[in-house]
Image (tube, rainbow, N blue to C red):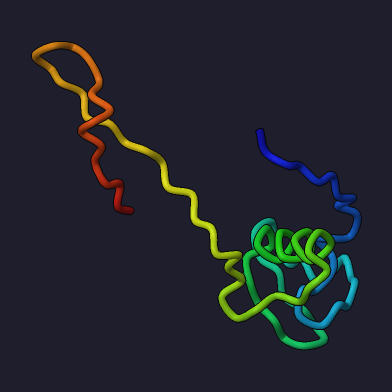
Amino acid sequence: GILVDRVDEENTSKTCSCCGQIRDANRVERGLYVCNSCATTMNADVNGAVNIRRKITQTPPTGDMSNGCLAQPGVYLFDTTTGAFHPQEQADCKP
């Protein structure tokens, strides 16, 4: 029941999400992205995700990059006496 957009991920892990420079050498190690042009340093997967998001939304990232939605799983308490979950006793899930 959700809308899914297919996006070509070509060069998203090689492109700097801040200045747009495309270089294989920017991905220094498996999880580290360092742009030689603008000195941006971040997690390589986050950089790639920002680039994919930009392809979908066509907008530059903001400071917090939030779309206003936050996934929060519903957590239900298990009653050991009855051996059942009780949806009316929903608990907060805090990280």
Left or right of 7? Residue 32 is left
* Residue at horizontal 60 percent and vertical 64 percent from the top: 67
* Residue at horizontal 33 percent and vertical 53 percent from the top: 95
Q: Nearer the viewer, residue 23 or 64?
A: 64
Residue farthest toward the top in the current orientation of the protein: 82
The quadrant in which residue 79 appears is: top left
Image coordinates of residue 48 in percent, x first then y, are 75, 61
Image coordinates of residue 34 in percent, x first then y, are 72, 75
Count the marks.
Answer: 0
Residue farthest toward the bottom in the current orientation of the protein: 38
* Residue at horizontal 42 percent and vertical 47 percent from the top: 72
* Residue at horizontal 89 percent and vertical 71 percent from the top: 23
- Quarter holding the N terminus is top right
Image coordinates of residue 81 in percent, x first then y, are 8, 14
In the depicted structure, whether residue 2 falls above or below residue 42: above
Left or right of 69? Residue 38 is right
Q: Nearer the viewer, residue 68 or 55?
A: 68
In the depicted structure, whether residue 24 falls above or below residue 73: below
Left or right of 5? Residue 49 is left
The quadrant in which residue 31 appears is: bottom right
Image coordinates of residue 18 in percent, x first then y, are 76, 80
Residue farthest toward the front in the current orientation of the protein: 88
The quadrant in which residue 3 appears is: top right
